[in-house]
Image (cartoon, helix red, strand yellow):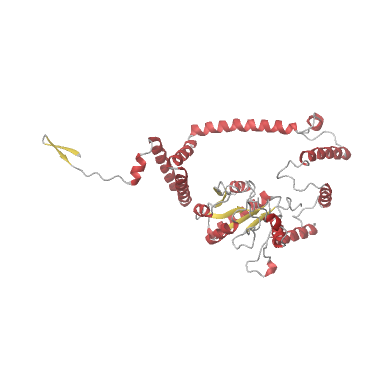
């Protein structure tokens, strides 16, 4: 009620109190600190949208959708605590403290890594005679250099020949390594930038690219395809391959759709090269969580994370952390429906999956697939390559199981 004083008399005027809404009831149960965090988050998001225009609105929408998903999964209080912590990290005092602690941890990691790596060297390699930080004043004879390198190579082989190596050596046959060394040595001074001087290097690269296109069911320009078919290039490894694919999709979206703030949507299990690509090329990488039990990403979660700025969706066949093939068919089809590109990262298993499919077609894996104690269905490998119309780029490492 309200109290009104007129000519020395007081009277009560009843005012109807509206019934609290569902939102008001929910907010009334939150502690004051959570309400402050929610207000700060809302204010920050609104300021972001006003400052950055359309890209800010996209970020606002993305953040709100993420908060809603986290609220459903963890509860509103946990989601508010998470975003409150993110806002607190933006404060100058907090940022300085975090930076100082990170610097201390980084310095400690560097010291520990240097000590651990130096333990792998023999005593002779640690001496001043075999430590060169500047150009030596005296020349060394070739035989002496080769003798030293041969000894170092032998000691390095001892570190991985026992089989305790993952993701570094994919073929330990000594005769095969000798063959690779001779082949590389014949073209050690070749420069592919000058095909007029190294025509056979150009021929070799073109034929290797054609082999890979055929292996991954792509169409070449000779297939009379309207879009010109597939093309490719040799890179220094899987990281550069992913970098080039991300850059190509960024440039295409910029030229054809005018997207100035490009985004990549991918599962959290993708290779770290996507992080590098986003950093190098001014892109935003949106990582989608995978199922804790199956290790697979939910296609609907990927769909909800896509915005008008999405230029690329990515998946792995298989991924590095768990060796699981992402739902490439569904993800690439989603990308095709939205008119964006899809990259199939086959860097790890690209030189295995095509041949496993052939073995299955020949019935040579029937005994493996019928084992009663095998919980994994190895009888079917989902499509992952250019058979799928939504796959617009693909990377495969020939230096892994291709033994190149």
Task: Tell me which residue sits at (84%, 40%) in the image.
Answer: 150
Q: Could you say which is closer to the camera, residue 339 or residue 389?
A: 389
Q: Position of residue 129 (x, y in %)?
A: 82, 30
Q: In the rendered view, does 60 fall on the left or right side of 348?
A: left
Instruction: Give the left or right position of residue 263, taking residue 372 as reference.
Output: left
Q: Is residue 213 left or right of residue 66?
A: right
Indicate the position of residue 180 as horizontal and vertical percent values. 81, 50
Foreground residue among 11 and 331: 331
Residue furthest to the front:
372
In the depicted structure, whether residue 371 falls above or below residue 80? below
Place residue 166 in its image quadrant.
top right
Instruction: Look at 70% across and 50% down and name the residue there.
Output: 237
How many dots with numbers?
0
Left or right of 55 on screen, residue 213: right
Q: State whether residue 395 is above or below residue 4.
A: below
Q: How far across and down, in percent of the image, does residue 22 sit?
A: 34, 46
Report if residue 121 is visible in the image.
yes
Is residue 349 shown above or below 215?
A: above
How far from the left and from the top, in percent, is residue 288?
A: 54, 49
Q: Residue furthest bottom?
A: 224
Image quadrant in which the N terminus is located: top left
Q: Nearer the viewer, residue 87 or 187?
A: 87
- Residue 248 shows in this picture: no
Instruction: Identify whether 131 is placed above or below 16.
Output: above
């Amino acid at each position: 009620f309200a109290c009104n004083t007129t000519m020395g008399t007081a009277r009560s005027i009843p005012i109807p109190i509206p019934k609290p809404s569902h939102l008001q009831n929910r907010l009334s149960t939150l502690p004051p600190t959570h309400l402050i965090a929610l207000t700060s988050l809302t204010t920050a998001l609104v300021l972001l949208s006003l400052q950055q225009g359309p890209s800010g609105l996209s970020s606002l929408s993305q953040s709100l959708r993420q908060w809603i998903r986290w609220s459903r999964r963890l509860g509103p209080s946990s989601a508010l605590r998470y975003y409150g912590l993110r806002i607190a990290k933006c404060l100058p005092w907090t940022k300085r403290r975090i930076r100082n602690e990170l610097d201390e941890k980084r310095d400690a990691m560097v010291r520990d890594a240097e000590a651990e790596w130096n333990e792998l060297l023999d005593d002779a390699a640690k001496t001043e005679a075999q430590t060169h930080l500047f150009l030596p004043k005296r020349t060394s004879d070739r035989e002496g250099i080769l003798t030293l390198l041969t000894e170092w190579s032998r000691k390095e082989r001892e570190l991985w020949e026992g089989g305790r190596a993952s993701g570094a050596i994919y073929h330990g046959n000594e005769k095969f390594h000798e063959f690779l060394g001779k082949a590389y040595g014949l073209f050690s001074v070749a420069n592919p930038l000058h095909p007029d001087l190294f025509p056979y290097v150009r021929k070799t690269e073109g034929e290797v690219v054609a082999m890979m296109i055929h292996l991954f069911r792509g169409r070449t320009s000779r297939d009379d395809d309207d879009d010109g078919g597939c093309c490719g290039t040799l890179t220094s490894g899987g990281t550069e391959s992913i970098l080039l694919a991300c850059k190509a999709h960024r440039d295409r979206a910029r030229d054809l759709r005018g997207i100035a703030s490009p985004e990549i949507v991918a599962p959290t299990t993708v290779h770290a090269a996507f992080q590098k690509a986003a950093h190098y090329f001014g892109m935003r990488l949106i990582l989608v969580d995978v199922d804790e039990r199956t290790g697979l990403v939910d296609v609907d979660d990927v769909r909800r994370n896509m915005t008008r700025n999405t230029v690329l969706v990515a998946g792995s066949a298989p991924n590095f952390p768990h060796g699981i093939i992402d739902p490439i068919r569904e993800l690439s089809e989603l990308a095709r429906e939205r008119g964006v590109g899809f990259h199939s990262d086959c860097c790890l298993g690209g030189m295995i999956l095509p041949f496993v499919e052939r073995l299955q077609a020949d019935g040579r894996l029937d005994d493996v697939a019928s084992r009663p104690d095998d919980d994994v269905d190895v009888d079917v490998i989902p499509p992952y390559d250019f058979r799928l119309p939504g796959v617009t780029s693909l990377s495969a490492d020939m230096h892994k199981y291709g033994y190149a």
